[in-house]
Amino acid sequence: MNPITGQRLVPSWRWSAHLPIALEVYRGLGDAFGEHFVRPFRIQRLVASRREERILASRIASGELRPHVAQTFPGGCWIEGAWQLDSRRLVCRLREMFRSWGVLEETEGSPDLGGTVICCTGAALQAGLGALQPVEGAVIEFQTAGLEPGVILNRGVWVLPLDSSRARAGSTYWKSTTTAGERAEDIAQLSESVAELVRQPLHEVTTLTGWRVTTPDKHPVAGWLGSPGKFGVINGLGAKGALHAPALARMWADHLDGQRELDAAFCPTRFSNRKA
């Protein structure tokens, strides 16, 4: 969860509204399980080109990056207030809990559940949401030494310390037309860029692949598909799922409880009238 993102160094959408909800939820779950699922980071953001250098200078001069960018240095800046969620461990704990409660049924296919259904199936959901854009990508994990704890490096690629001897870095972005050879080249290029950034060879490198689903305006979808009360959805969270998911889940819960209306900014059908 990064307050300033992308090559254009823009503030993350709805950061101030959604981050407090995300931290409340993740810390609450941590207390319930007796574990810590989130941890704070600062980001050493290095510019990768003259263009990025000009953008950074312009953003700082305009005040757009306050209060997250308060310190600069030749070739970059420090971004304060980032967080990392151990989503894999959290999902495993939630699965165990739901199983113990007898409320989780894991099946293949699309069973007819009846009643009101809120679909949160990521890249598996296509029907009725043609605007969703599933893409595959990869990160690498590797053995390393000398990285500063609590600091993410970012210069075109990012490097996140997992512990004193291992780190994760990413990422690649593959369309459906990307060939196996092109994917291998992308991973090799990622490894080369990371080694250059950390200034040392990478050891015991492993590759992790997964899906992210985005939308034309890069914002999530959350709302009813068709008539209210039957079939709803949360999807299209892209690379911001850790930030947005708790707020969208809470919005749905409050809506189903009759406490609020759904936010039109997340309407799943907002792309319907766009020209192809």
Image: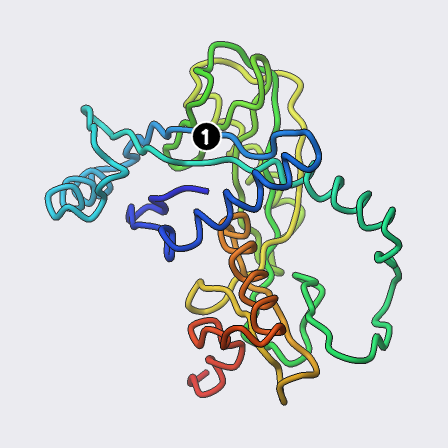
Residue at the top extreme?
146
| Crowd around label 1: few <14 · some 14–19 · many ≥20 (10 Å) | few
Closer to the camera in the image, 30 or 171: 30
Q: Quadrant of residue 66?
A: top left
Closer to the camera in the image, 58 or 150: 150
Q: Quadrant of residue 230?
A: bottom right
164 vs 2, left or right, is: right
74 vs 131, left or right, is: left
Question: For the image shown, how many numbered marks are present on the structure?
Answer: 1
228 vs 75, left or right, is: right
Seen at 54% across and 28% down, the residue is 191
- On screen, residue 159 above or below 199: below
- On screen, residue 88 above or below 125: above
Seen at 66% across and 47% down, the residue is 210
- State the SS at label 1: strand
Q: Position of residue 141 (x, y in %)?
A: 61, 27
Closer to the camera in the image, 192 or 271: 271
How does the figure colour the protein chain or chains?
rainbow
Q: Position of residue 217 (x, y in %)?
A: 41, 68
Q: Position of residue 38 (x, y in %)?
A: 55, 34
Q: Position of residue 24 (x, y in %)?
A: 52, 44
- On screen, residue 27 above or below 177: above
275 vs 187, left or right, is: left
Seen at 55% across and 63% down, the residue is 236
Closer to the camera in the image, 169 or 227: 227
Q: Which residue is mark 1?
A: 40
Q: Amino acid at mark 1?
A: Pro
